[in-house]
Image (cartoon, helix red, strand yellow):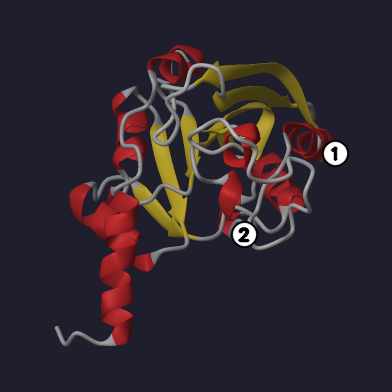
Amino acid sequence: MEPTEENLRAWDDAHRARAEPVELPQFVQRTLGDLKGKRVLHLLCGAGEATAALAELGAVATGVDPRPAALEAARGRWPKILWVDGEPQSLPRQLRRGRFDLVYSGEGVLGRLDDLDGWALGIAAALRAPGELLVFDDHPVADCVDGLLRWRSDYFRDPAGADRLWRIGQVVSALTRAGLRVEALEEYPGGTSRRRHDQRIPATFLLYARRVA
């Protein structure tokens, strides 16, 4: 393989994907419950480790990601799982047919979104009624505070800018507009995230919702 710019970028993408969390946190697993036989869509699956973990819990898992190199690595390791090229905020048509029992949106998804409503509407279209959504992601407050607990940016800044930040209220509102009913929202301190360890700062949050109709 020649070290072209495209190949180097693909190599970089694959390694970034592998660097993402590969184990589901215990409280996420408890919330997921029994997945035996359930059709589960994993958004931004990367190189597939967390998707494979869902499959090990009994799910009929499908992973979606826009990075070809990451999907190629996933297909090579878990050929029995369906891997689909697509963006979390604009899911491919074949995933928007109301066939999934659960959509799992894990860490790093919200920070990639330009279109929060597109993400929410895609989830609603992917779920059967009354399908479930589980979001586990970085808490937006953690992105506003540095390692010395000093505010380094505005929590209420424009989320459409280059440094994306979607507030919790915006996430809940987008899901509600899409026809999902939020039933639980929990926030967790440092130690639950790959980046934050201070117990005084919310590091991650978990949101559980259902498709209403």
Secondary structure type for disc 1: helix
Q: Which percent across, then down, holds residue 151? A: 65, 38
Left or right of 86 in this view: 123: right
Which residue is denoted by mark 1 in the rendering?
A: 177
Is residue 23 shown above or below 126? Answer: above
Q: Of helix, strand and loop, which one carries label 2?
A: helix
Task: Give the residue displayed 85% in from the left and 39% down from the top.
Answer: 177
Task: Give the crowd class for mark 1: few <14, some 14-19, many >=20 residues within 10 Å.
Answer: few
**Quadrant in which residue 65 is drawn:** bottom left
Residue 19: percent from left, percent from top: 30, 47
Q: Position of residue 77 (x, y in %)?
A: 19, 49
Real-space Cα separation, disc 2 to disc 1, in angstroms = 20 Å
Observer-nearest of 65 and 188: 188
Up-down relation of residue 47 to residue 36 (above or below): below
Please identify the residue farthest to the left as the structure is shown: 1
- Residue hosting label 2: 93
Q: Nearer the viewer, residue 179 or 201?
A: 201
Q: List x then y, in percent, for residue 168.
A: 72, 32
Kindly give the residue lying farthest to the right in the view shown: 177
**Is label 2 in contact with label 1 (beta carbons under 8 Å)?**
no
Which residue is at the front of the view, 142 or 137? Answer: 142
Q: Is residue 169 above or below residue 27?
A: below
- The numbered disc on residue 17 is none
